[in-house]
Amino acid sequence: MFLQPKKTKYKKIKKGRQLKLNFKGNKLNFGNIGLKSTESGLITSRQLESARQSINRKLKRKGKIWIRVFPSLPITTKPTEVRMGKGKGSVSHWGVKVAPGSIIFEIINKNFYDSIKALNSGKHKLPVKTKIIKN
């Protein structure tokens, strides 16, 4: 099951610009080790879910994981071979804009080495460059 909001105020919104810096959500709040983005970009809900599954597989249910970002940005596409104009396309998937410095995942686990292995496997599933930070 992919992450998406239950209800939104508007069905379609504009994309906007890439975020330059992040001053909120750039410190660990829940876990003792986390995955922090080093560049801005867009992460889809499928990519987040894939990274979460990969991290959980490596942790083997011995730790707790928090996802600190939520995909609430609707991404629209028009069907192929459709003429220009005629309005904006329908919502195809959901994404989240990530700024440099924002925490994506947090883990609390007794074994530090397993946590690093799990986050390394998860960071390969994401389209933005990330680094592992510890508390």
Image (tube, helix red, strand yellow):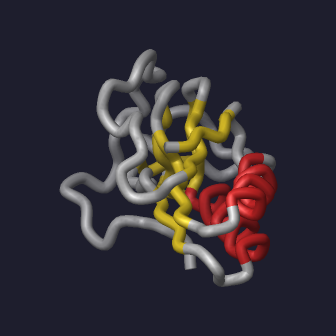
Locate residue 131: give its quadrant. Answer: top right
Identify the residue at horizontal 37%, vertical 34% (top origin): 14
**Nearer-the-camera pick, 25 or 79:** 25
Left or right: 49 in relation to 108: right
Residue 104, horizontal then vertical, whole percent: 52, 48
**Nearer-the-camera pick, 102 or 12:** 102
Q: Residue furthest left?
A: 9
Residue 81, horizontal then vertical, whole percent: 73, 45
Q: Quadrant of the N terminus?
A: bottom right
Q: Residue furthest top?
A: 20
Say above or below: 122 vs 22.
below
**Nearer-the-camera pick, 59 or 101:** 59
Identify the residue at horizontal 61%, vertical 58% (top origin): 48
**Nearer-the-camera pick, 118 or 128:** 118
Say above or below: 57 vs 123.
below
Residue 43, horizontal then vertical, whole percent: 58, 45
Locate residue 35: give its quadrant. Answer: top right
